[in-house]
Amino acid sequence: MGYSQDTLQVFTINGQVHFKSDAPLELIEAESDALKGLIDFYNQTFAFTIPVNSFKGFNSALQKEHFNENYMESDQYPRATFAGKMIEKVDISQPGEYIVRAKGKLTIHGVEQERIIRATIRVVGESISIQAAFSVLLQEHNITIPKVVQHKIAEEIFVDIRANGLRK
Amino acid sequence: MMLRTLLCTWFLSFVLSFYGNGQNPYFRDHPLPLEFKKADVTCVLQDHNYFIWLGTSVGLIRFDGNSYEHYERLDKSNHISALYQDSHHVLWIGFQDGSIEKFQNGKFHAVSQIKQPVSSPITGIVEGSNNEMWFSTYGEGLVFVSTDTAYTFAQNHGLSDNFVYAIVRDENNHIVAGTDRGISVCSRPNNKTEVEIINTDHGLPDNIVTSLTYRSGKLWIGTESQGVCSLDLTTRKWQYPVQTWTRGRATSILPLEETIWIGTAMHGVVEADIKGKFVTDISKTDKSLPLRVNDITMDSEGNIWIAGPGNIHSGNRTFTFLTHFEGKQLDNVQAILYSREGTIWYSTNQGVFFTKDVASGTPKHLDLPDLKGIQVISLYQDPDGYIWFGTFDAGVFRYDLISGNMLQVTEKNGLINNNVLSIAGKDDELWFATLGGVSQCKVTENKNGKPEFVFNNYTSEHGLGSNYIYKIFVDTQGKIWFATDGKGVTVYENGEFKNYSLNEGLKSNIIYSVTEDASQKIWISTSNAGIYHLEGNSFKPFMPRNGLRDLSISAIIGEKNGNILVVSPQGIDILDPITGVVYYHGQEFGIADIDPNLNAYTIDSIGNIWLGTQSGIVKYNTNIPPMQKWPVTRINEVQIFLAAIDSTQKKFRFNQNHVSFDYMGFWYHDPAEVTYRLKLEGYDLEWVTSKNHFITYPNLPPGDYCFMVQASATTYFDGIPVRKFAFTILPPFYNTAWFYGLLAVSGAVLLFWFVKARERKLRAREKTEKDKIRFQLETLKNQVNPHFLFNSFNTLIGVIEEDKETAVAYVEKLSDFYRQILLSREKDVIPLSQELELLENYYFLQLKRFKKNFKLNVDIPDDKHKFSIPPLTLQLLVENALKHNIVSNDKPLIIDIRVENDYLIVRNNLQRKAAYESSTGLGLSNIMNRFRLLTNKKVVVHETPEYFVVSVPLLDF
């Protein structure tokens, strides 16, 4: 039997997402380890998803509530996703570090944005690890910040991703 | 005076530091109409009719330099994402929603071949061979449309990726698509599409290819993050003009002769040298330009168009500017010099600078301690390569480029004056113009190898007009010209000075500048009396046909193409000395208030002119060929009663005589300068000049006309092609040859009828005449009928015997009767009374014969006697009755004559003889014929078993 060429190159991904809002008056950070995804290195496609309400951290419970209810409206838009294709090729039979650009649609708060995100993929034997950093402009995703808290929430949110993948 | 301004600037000092920056053309904003202010201009192109078309997020906009015309689809998305004009001049439009339309005659038309439209944005359009069209989509690959079919060509067919950003065609009919995963080169041998993929494995710096431009054998490639490169598709040679690229996505590329212009998604417009010598961020200096550039293109005049969110800009490279360094304004450039090393030297209040790289204009400060606190106002490079600095109050300095040694030469060394405004050289002589005369200087070396300066000084005492000299100019003949303050212009030739002043034709003696044109003619500019040129022994004022914009001229400069630049604070007038026409360059070129410094100019090795101004350096690029010498004139529309007509129509009806023309002179780099000259041949006797682009000719009489129009940017029209529209206003139908023909034919027919009718009438009259004669003859024959006479005589015999008197009366009546017949027979009609008289005579004669067997009852009222009747009518009718009826004692004949409705009714009781007396039978028909000629009323003959009735109309003559 054995695996076909296609399925051999599909990896399931689990990982963490960390974000940081560095506003003049307040630094807010939160983290979630509920990132899940799939990467098909043969077809060079990928899909990631994370439940918005899985983020922990923040500076207070109230802040988390605000995050979910007021800004992200996580009841209405429960998931943030990123799916698309990889521009550069990764040879998973060759251990090493690859820098690839992931181009796809980033959906946050129900608003789709086409993004090209640079990621580092490290191939170690049968597993891979992924690292990426990018920023999200709240305005681009139709997330409006009331004037009162503009000095407490940054317009640009920095996002870090660390994830590991195993052959499916 | 000029000196005062110079001294003023001397006291102004700024402390600025300068970093590298390039030269920019001046870009003009063309603000979209208010309602489209938020529109994103996604693409721009110029069509074959010279219109600029803008594809925007709110539809299609046509721009002619002055006004905008907006076109949109009803009930559909109008977000345009691609524009293209094919070889048949059809405009193709791709939309963000994936639809594709053709645009012709102001209307959108669906592409009928496309049955299953895509839903991804159309990013590019290109025409293939055989009228095939290719469309690139962002998500669904390519769409191919032939004359009868359409299909998509995508990743599963071999395309590198379905996300396609751009599509172009090369000289070998390859369709080249830029995608997320490299470039796909498609060809269609044998109607089957084949693809070759070019990616990073082949030398592409980045697989995401975001823009493509094909120009003269080279494919220019813009990428997502690695800048731009070019590939020769035949030789497969790559070129990478920019080594390290930090400006993000390249959205559009415009390759020019030596540089490429790149539009970026976030960093505005970038100009890069093709050979990699420099990269300039145009948008960094020109803040008006958008940071997100969607498209860059060039029009037929050489203007560069930049499309971005909410705006469109155009710039012309005739003049480029070096005005800013790192966002800071470059101030007062007082002297400028192009040295043989390819370096531009210039001085400001901050000292002396030089730009090693002339093309990019990146300046460097020359740190010369000797010049600290000294203002350099003139620059010169001698044949040995030394750079000379002329200063205020400190004489001149000689700078050795190789050793860096500086040598100061002042009045102490023999220089006539320490204020040196201009330096020139001839062979091994140096000439210094100062505020105290001129110094001629030769440099020799002494025994120690030290330079020695030998001066010959000249002042007004030697024949120099004045000791204040603004400019020294050495012409191609070796003559040295001095522009003096207050004493005209002086020339030094063969050791002698000759002065030209008021007596030699000048109206002002303050001369600021001297130059020579391409035909070696000397030109001078004065402080306020315009320009002069030397003709023989005197200077003649030269007033260009269309005037000079500003008379405070700071420099006059002959350039290599034969033109003369007249530099003033209002801009630069470029004079063509042959036609005498001036081309104004001001506001629209960004040089309306440059405030140039007196004679601060230099000419580089390829003939470009660099000007020092109070706000930096302006370069006049003489090597950009003028793509158009004058505006392109076009007749946009012909209108009849203000409604547009198909311009192929050339003939109008006589009442379509209100004709209007909408015309245009395309001159995008300065539309306000366009003037029109018009003439309607057949109507106007002279040309009319106008600033309007619309004219109406009302009430044109029928005739042949030719509308002619020219557009000029100078109000001078010679040599400019004339656009024409010839047309005819037809005469009205009653004025046409065919109508005259018809008229003639119908006239002839009428005449024919008339002749015929007359002939018929004449013939009828002739016949009547004959009838009359015959009737008269008949009557006479009747009256001389032997029977009548015989009967009459028999009657007479009987009467004679019985009654002598009655016999006499009988004979009298008989003779009366015959006389009456003779009297009336020539007449057409006689009064009824006369006829009745005649009838009475006849009755008397007959009564003697028939006695009681015959009775005639005449009952006619007197008022009817005035009517007329043909003569002998009644007599004949009565005679007829006697002739055809039995008259006997048993059956007496009774004839009643009465009037009824203006008819005379003659009735007798009918008692026909078995065989009646011979008759010609003409009697009754004769009466009828005669009445027919006289009246429309008919003679009616009516017969019943008892009566024979004849009704004859009474005539009202």
Image (cartoon, helix red, strand yellow):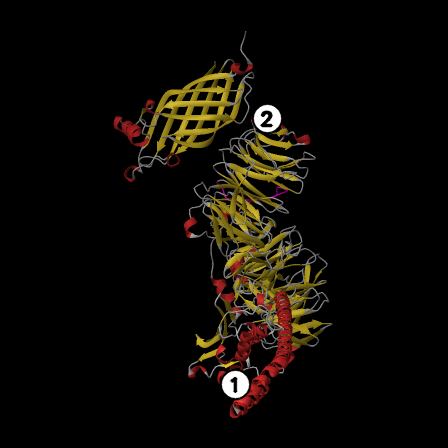
Q: CA distance from mark 2 to mark 1?
A: 132 Å
Between B677 and B899, the one lying in front of the other is: B899
Q: Is residue A55 above or below residue B280?
A: above
Q: Is residue B71 left or right of residue B765?
A: left
Q: To which chain does the residue with label 2 belong?
A: B
Q: Secondary structure at mark 2?
A: helix
Query: Can residue B615 be seen?
Result: no
Q: Which mark is residue B350?
A: none
Q: Residue B645, position in %: x, y?
A: 54, 56
Highlighted range, magenta? B266-277
Dot 2: within a 10 Å radius of its alpha carbon, few (fewer than 14), some, or many (20 or more) residues? few
**Which residue is painted at 59% across and 28% down in the image?**
B159
Please tell me the numbered disc located at residue B157.
2
Task: Say which of B841 and A144 sits in front.
Answer: B841
In magenta stretch: residue A18: no
Q: Secondary structure at mark 1?
A: helix
Task: Point out the residue furthest to the front here.
Answer: B801
